[in-house]
Image: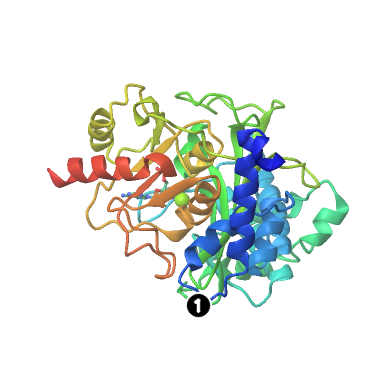
Amino acid sequence: MLPRIFHSKPSTLFVLVVSLVILALSFLPSTTLLPRLRLLTSHFTLRPISTAATTVNNTTNMASYAQELNIALLAVQRATLLTKSVFHSHAKGTLSKNDASPVTIGDFGAQALIIAALQHAFPQDAIVAEEEAKDLRENESLRDLVWDLVQNAKLADSSAEETLGGPIKSPAEMLDIIDKGDSAGGSSGRIWAIDPIDGTKGFLRGGQYAVCLGLMVDGDVKVGVLGLPNLPESDSEPLVEGIGAEQTDAAGKGVLISAVQGQGAASRPLGKGALAEGHSIQMKPLENVSEATFCESVEAGHSSQGDAADIARKLGITKPSVRMDSQAKYGSIARGAGDLYLRLPVKKDYVEKIWDHAAGDLIVREAGGEVTDVEGKRLDFGQGRTLKNNKGVIAAPKSVHAQVIEAVKSVLGSK
Ligand code: AMP
Ligand code: MG
């Protein structure tokens, strides 16, 4: 007679055998020739379900960056509200800079507000920001316009406003604060990267723009926040050409998209006071790259639209590209509204700026994507104010990124 156990169902037998093997392996010393098998068994041990954040913190002792995220979200929210008020009050005092990009009073005002908040919370941190106060120092009426805006930009929640350190005290202090964004960047220490209005042309034409803030520690982006006042609140609204154009102050518009390294990416409605509740976002699973929706710059001078069309053709993509200004492209693919972001160099000698990519790079990677340059190298934020080790940007879900890079290399290599 066989023992009773051998009369059990095959599945019971299987569970018993696997359990015995696991038990036996767990007694093996760590110096055994089978460390890989022990590792394998550890994947089958039952663990309590926990959030991504606690898992990461418990296992690798990684800093949580909770305070940094909170300050960054509130600072970006306040600055984004300022930019909206500039747009609606039609006070778009534009200047021309050497590189011919329009600069608005919103740029200066948003930068002043963000730096003031960072200096209050993290006075030791270095800051790399796009603007400098020189033009304001030389132009009193412009300075007064900016000062007027900055004074009136307050969150409608006194405790949130207090967290950010309250108002800037004088026009002179405002100019000094703007100039605090002059760090040379680099690969050591804590450095914030700010683009007060990314996509200035989008802002002026009433399309997409972004207020961008990223924290790098030793050249690695740890926290990223994008204020996107003209994107729909809903993550699932499909990306279409002209999205965000003809903006109004209607409800349902405006999001804050953020990420912390190792803790995933999140989206929340852009509010006016305390932060709204956030929810986690992920890139859309993409089985077949030919079904992708890809985003690119509106400005043909910022990204080669001809090369993008050739790459799309190579990948079998038939949907037309969605052209939008700013890091709204990163935010849109991170929440699954689109799939790919292609930024293909137009001028050989152009070097990308860290403030144009720091927040978006982390947000897409934390949402399940891969972000590299056109050669497949990770963006290197430790090289100063620019990404001088990289050319262009290719952001895609992990599952298809290598395939996209292959198509990029084949199209760019054949030129
Ligand atoms: P986008 O809205 O994606 O077209 O990007 C806007 C950003 O492009 C601006 O913030 C500029 O810093 C940057 N930019 C300016 N000139 C160039 C260029 N020739 N190639 C790539 N990016 C550029
Ligand atoms: Mg920019």
Specify whether 324 is left or right of 122.
Answer: left
Count of numbered circles in the view: 1
Tell me what residue is drawn at x 87 percent, y 53 percent: 158
Tell me what residue is drawn at x 40 percent, y 29 percent: 292
Q: Assign the N terminus to one quadrant of the image.
A: top right
Seen from the viewer's position, the closer of residues 1 and 193 is: 1
> Tag 1's secondary structure?
loop
The spot of residue 49 in percent (x, y) is 73, 49
For badge 1, the amino acid type reads Ser
The spot of residue 326 in percent (x, y) is 47, 43
Seen from the viewer's position, the closer of residues 307 and 7 is: 7
The image quadrant of residue 291 is top left
Name of the residue lying farthest toward the left: 414
The spot of residue 44 in percent (x, y) is 61, 52
Can the viewer see residue 264?
Answer: no
Tell me what residue is drawn at x 51 percent, y 45 percent: 368
The spot of residue 100 in percent (x, y) is 36, 49
Residue placed under numbered mark 1 in the picture: 188
The image quadrant of residue 403 is top left
Tell me what residue is drawn at x 51 percent, y 71 percent: 182
Q: Assign the C terminus to one quadrant of the image.
A: top left
